[in-house]
Image: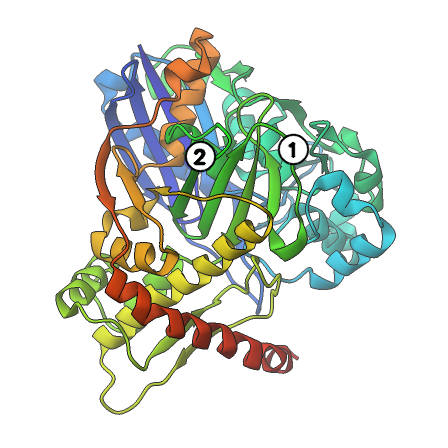
Amino acid sequence: MLFLGLDVGTSGVKAVICDSNNKVMSSSHAPLTVSRPHPLWSEQNPTDWWSATNKAVMDLDPKIRSGVKAIGLSGQMHGATLLGEDGKAIRPAILWNDGRSASQCKTLETQIPNLRLITGNCAMPGFTAPKLLWVKENEPDIFKKISKVLLPKDYVRLRMTGEYASDMSDSAGTLWLDTAARDWSSEVLSACGLSDKNMPRLFEGTEATGQLRAELAEAWGMDKVVVAAGGGDNAAGAVGSGIYSRGDGFLSLGTSGVIFLADDAYRPHPDGGIHTFCHALPDRWHQMSVMLSAASAIDWVSSVCGFKSPAKLYEKAASRNKPSNQEIFLPYLSGERTPHNDPLAQGVFFGLNHSTTAEDMAQAALEGVAFGLADGINSLKDSGAEIRSLSVIGGGARSDYWGEILASIFDLPLIYRDGGAVGPAYGAARLARLCHSKEAIKDVCTSPKITNVIEPNLALRDHFKPRQALFNKLYTSLSDLFKENQS
C-alpha cells in the first residue's frame, strides 16, 4: 500500500509517497515565497499554498500516485490564516516568523496570569494568539469578518476535504490550547475576542478528518482517500524519524532550526523560551527549542555573498575547511525565540576586515547558526533534559561539513538517516498509514536506517568554546541597540 505525505512549508510544499516498508517511492517540491511588506512582518497568501500543493501532487509519478490509500498533512506552525464565512482568506496569513505582536504578548501575559500554566508556554510573537490580538487592535474591520482561524496545513485540508479540522501538535502552537487537557482553552480564546466556534475541530494526528473531495480525487488521479489529521512540521518530522519515546530527540535544519525532545508526559518549562506542545501521536508531548533562522540564514548569506546556490556555499566552505578565527555571524534575521524571546534581535556580521572573503563569511554563517542552536540545547538541559545524541532532518542535513561543525559545537553525536531531507512530509505519510491501517505505532514509526554518524571533533570543540562565549557576549551587548534600531 502507498501513502501520501504533504508538508506545507515556508519555502515550499513537499510531497512524498511511501510504501508499507517506509520506502519513498516518489517525491516532489513546489516553491513558495514570503512577503515582508514592513519591518518584522512575514506573510503568505493562503491561495499560494493551495497552488503549490496541487503542483507538488501533480509532479509525483502518476502511476504511483494512483495507488495512494491515505493522505497525511504537515505544515509550518503558528500561521494565522483568517477566513470569512465563505471559507476564503480575508487577508494574507501572518507567519510563524512574524514579529509584529510583541506588545500583544505582554497584554496576554498580564490579562491571564496563569497563561503559562494553561498552555505550557510563554507568549511569543510567533504564536497565533498574539497575532489575532494585533489584528483586533490594528485591523478591526478585518477582525469583525473572521469566521474561522486555521493553521496553514489546515487551510489546505479545508480545500482538500471541506472540513475545518486540526491536530493537537499544530494546535498547541497557537497558544489557545490547554496543552495538558488537549483541548481549546476558552479563557485564552476569550482574551483574544474569540471562542471555540472560531476554531477547527481537534483530532489526534492519526485520526481521520475527512475524505478527499471527489472532483479533487479525479484531478489528482486517486481514489476518495481518507485524510489524516497529521501534525505540525516538527512533530511530523519526529514521527518520520521514529522519535516518540522519552529521551528521543532530533535537530531540524529547515527554514528554522529546532531541537526536539519527545516525552511520554506533559512536563512544561516555559522559562528560557522552551516550548512544550502535544505530539502528533496520542498521549505524548514534546519539548522544543526554536531558532527562527537556520537554513534560511545560510540561504540569505549565500545570496548576498554571490554564491550560485546554498549548495555552492556548503561546497566552498567545505573546500576552505577552516574554522573562523575572527568573523562571527549573529543569525537573528527574523528576531529570535529560544532562549531570548526577542523579536527585535537582528542579524550581524562582526569582525570583518579588508581580507574577509565570501568563503570566510560562509564559514561564519555556518558557525553562527550552530552557536544559536547550542543556546537552545543549553536551555533544554537547564530544564532537566538529558540529550545523548540527535538525529538530523531537514534540507541542511545534506551537508556533512556543517554536521561536523554542529556536532563539535554541541559536543554531541549527530545521526543521519534515510529520508532525513524530506522530514515532515515523510512523517505525514506515516501518520496517513497509521490512520488507514490502525497498526501499532511501534510497528510504523521505526527509526529509518542510519546512513552516517558524525562525532564531535575534539580539536574543533575546544576551538569553538571561546567563540561561543564571544557570540553570546555580542548578543548581550547589542540587545538594547536592536531595540533602538527598530524605533
* Residue in view at x 40 percent, y 46 percent: 251
Left or right for 272, reference 350:
right
Residue 454 location, x and y as percent?
Answer: 24, 48
Q: Three-letter amino acid code at disc 1?
A: Tyr
* Residue in view at x 85 percent, y 50 percent: 113
Which quadrant, please, contains the N terminus? top left
**Looking at the image, is 486 positioned above or below residue 13?**
below
Q: Please give the label number shown on residue 248.
A: 2
**Looking at the image, is 43 positioned above or below residue 157?**
below
Query: Which callout, 1 or 2, points at the residue further toward the start of the chain?
Result: 2
Q: Which residue is mark 1?
A: 266
Left or right for 466, reference 451:
right
Report how far apart the C-alphas of labels 1 and 2 lie in the structure. Answer: 15 Å
Q: Please give the label number shown on residue 187.
A: none
Can residue 138 be seen here? The reply is no
Quadrant housing residue 151: top right
Q: Choose between 445 and 486: the one closer to the eye.
A: 445
**Mark 1, secondary structure of its residue:** loop
* Residue in view at x 36 percent, y 61 percent: 409
Residue count near mark 1 (Cα–Cα under 10 Å), binned few <14, some 14–19, many ≥20:
some
**Mark 2, secondary structure of its residue:** loop
Residue 441 location, x and y as percent?
Answer: 45, 16
Q: Choose between 11 and 84: the one closer to the eye.
A: 11
Q: Residue furthest bottom?
A: 354
Quadrant housing residue 81: top right
